[in-house]
Amino acid sequence: MNRDHLKREWLELSEPWIKEAQEGRNPTRNGLLDKPMLEACGNVKGLKILDCGCGEGRFCRILVDKGAEYVFGLDLCEPMIEAAKELQSGSDTYRVADVQNLSFIEDGTFDLIVSYLNQCDLPDFDANNREVFRVLRSGGRFIVANLHPMRSAVGQWHRTDNGEKQHVILDRYFDEGERCWKMMGVEFTNFHRSLSTYTTGFIQAGFRIDAITEPTITREKLKLYPELDDELRVPNFIIYALRKP
Ligand SMILES: C[S@@+](CC[C@H](N)C(=O)[O-])C[C@H]1O[C@@H](n2cnc3c(N)ncnc32)[C@H](O)[C@@H]1O
């Protein structure tokens, strides 16, 4: 799958994605991932932050609201960046860029870098790791939310004849590479890698792993977002908290 094709898939997804992010319920973000992502980021007051694959800038705006000094959002797709710019406050800026090459950013620029469901989109996540490591200051942190490798392998539920979910099928775990999904009516490509490939990649890039979290949902949140009932049963997502020594 070449990079132009991958970009075209996201360009096609941009319009429904922006609408859902700005007007929808966003269960995965609001109900599940935002809280542990913000906990992993810690106190962001006064920090210079880079968001790799920022989409339409939703998490950048949250970080600004939490007191970040400056947030720089990068995304491959022009419509995402245009939508982010429309809502920018002054402490956040945006640019179209491929996060596998950050050559326009100087070494040691950022205190904190986030990647919120972006590494699973990258053919070369090692390149992203190397670039993030370079543009992070010493002692700075890299917070990565990703599809859980148990779920990016083969993602189907085994169901009874009447459609009830019985259990998740896990197969092709060690067969790393492209996986084709359908989201918002659009076919798009993700990259599956095992847990050991991810953790080894982080360590080889020079990061120390501070924590690995598998977010699940509270009973209270489940009342608000009943569509997240899977989350009590299987790990759909994972958050890596990394540090540049
Ligand atoms: C799953 S969305 C996540 C968006 C945002 N972080 C959020 O959580 O709402 C992935 C984003 O990564 C972007 N993307 C995909 N490949 C990229 C690349 N190589 N460089 C930069 N952005 C990329 C897509 O355009 C899309 O906006």
Image (tube, helix red, strand yellow):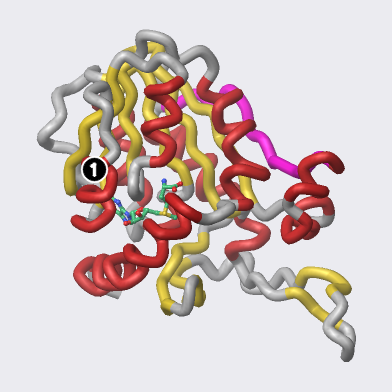
Task: Give SS at disc 1.
Answer: helix
**Residue underneath mark 1:** 86
Q: Quadrant of residue 32?
A: top right
Indicate whether 210 appears above or below 240: above
Which kind of residue does numbered mark 1 sit on? Glu
240 vs 75, nearest the viewer: 75
Residue 65 place in picture, x, y as percent: 43, 22
x, y (%) of residue 166?
88, 73
Point 75% across, 43% down: residue: 216
Hey, which quadrant is residue 68 in on the image? top left
**Residue 207, x across and y down, in percent:** 44, 27
Vertical side of 235 occupied by 240: above or below: above
Question: Residue pushed farthest top?
Answer: 46
Point out the image quarter for the C terminus: top left
| Foreground of the two, 91 or 86 | 86
Q: Which residues, given as a range, are shown in magenta?
A: 207-218
User: Is 235 within the magenta?
Assistant: no
Quick one: which residue is furthest to the left in this view? 104
Is 166 left, or right, of 140 in this rendering? right
Q: Give whichever of 192, 156 is nearer the camera.
A: 156
Residue shown at the point (47%, 79%) measured from the top left? 185
Front-most of residues 60 and 159 = 60
